[in-house]
Amino acid sequence: MKQFMELLKRAFRSRMFTVVAVLLFVSAIGLNGATKWMELTFRKVPVEPARRLDLVAATIGGWRQVSQDQPLEADMQEALGTQRYIFRDYVDVSVLGRDTLDDWMSKPVLERRQKLARFEQEHPEAVVHFALTYYTGLVDTVAHIPERCYVAGGFEPAASKEEDWPIMATPVPVRYISFEDVTGFNSSIARNVVYFFNVNGEFTSSNITVRRRLQNLLVRHGFYAKVEAMCLAKDRAKAQRTLAAFLTAAMPEVMLCLPDFQKVESGQATASAK
């Protein structure tokens, strides 16, 4: 023990030993800090919506929500991967009629759904099924896209196109897909779906782009929202006009839910819900 202490004293008197020890100490601190920073940037600091999604208006332009906001069953919500969502059915009041709408809204939810289903068979271009979901925190795959969900339900894409839709002052990149039933049960029904994302304040129609932007190690915060709308009109062009008209009216409501990412990232705004 005495010999060991003597050797240690000699080592500390050595300038080279001192330099190496200091370098190792600094490196250890730096590695520890880098590890914590990497974990932070991979996980991302959560960014809450600017307002609750269920505050999206029931009346959007000439469209009226006829469904009722309800929570998903526990297993479905777990599969969705978020507790922030709305799934709604909107109808074109100019086609349905104000008196009929008032009558519908006085009925129980189940009866309202039955009336909607019959109305949609006759006027598919006057009904839009709308979904808004919001994710924040962990960087992960974007699993819930129509190409996976509809195919799992027995539909196959018959036509698909990425394009810019003039639903805001600056056109928004969207993916527009027409699905056809391959099970034989609903061969007369076409599901025309449009969807896009807003990730960290920027629009994209690509789930791959969402992942890449969330994986940016230079960015501390992270969120993305998916906007999706579906119309059963058999005519693809007619369905597109319906969906574009609805989204043009709906986008101001959607934007009220999205945080100002630049202010959050720069520290000018909090990342908590308002």
Image: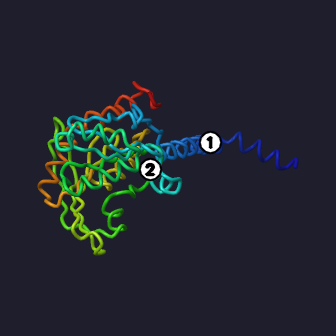
Q: Which picture quadrant has residue 221?
A: top left
As drawn, is 29 to the left or to the right of 93? right
Q: Could you say where residue 111 lies in the image, as x and y percent from the top left? A: 37, 49
Sequence-wise first label, 1 or 2: 1
| Residue type marked 2 | Val
Residue at 36% x, 28% y: name it. Answer: 263
User: Relative to the observer, which residue lies in front, 185 or 217?
Assistant: 185
- Looking at the image, residue 236 lies above or below residue 267: below
Q: Residue at x 46, y 43 (%)?
A: 44
Count of marks placed on residues: 2
Disc marking residue 251: none
In which quadrant of the rendered image does the C terminus lie? top left
Whether residue 96 is situated above or below residue 144 in the rendered picture:
above
- On residue 139, the disc is 2
Compared with 6, 271 (above or below) is above
The x and y percentages for residue 256 are: 32, 31
Secondary element at tag 2: loop
Farthest residue, direction top: 268
177, 216: nearer the viewer: 177
Percent position of residue 157, x then y = 24, 66
The residue singled out by tag 1 in the image is: 25
Tell me where residue 101 appears, x and y as whole percent: 27, 40
Task: Check disc 2: other Cα within 10 Å, few if <14, some if 14-19, many if 20+.
Answer: many
Task: Quadrant for residue 122, please give it.
Answer: bottom left
Task: Choose mark 1 or mark 2, whichever is in front.
Answer: 2
Residue at the extreme right: 2
| Three-letter code, disc 1 | Phe
- Numbered disc 1: secondary structure: helix
Q: Residue at x 44, y 50 (%)?
A: 139
Estimate how packed mark 1 is, as few (under 14), some (14 to 19) or many (20 or more) residues with alpha carbons within 10 Å: few
For the point 12% across and 54% down, which residue is it?
238
Quote the CA–CA distance across marks 1 and 2. 32 Å
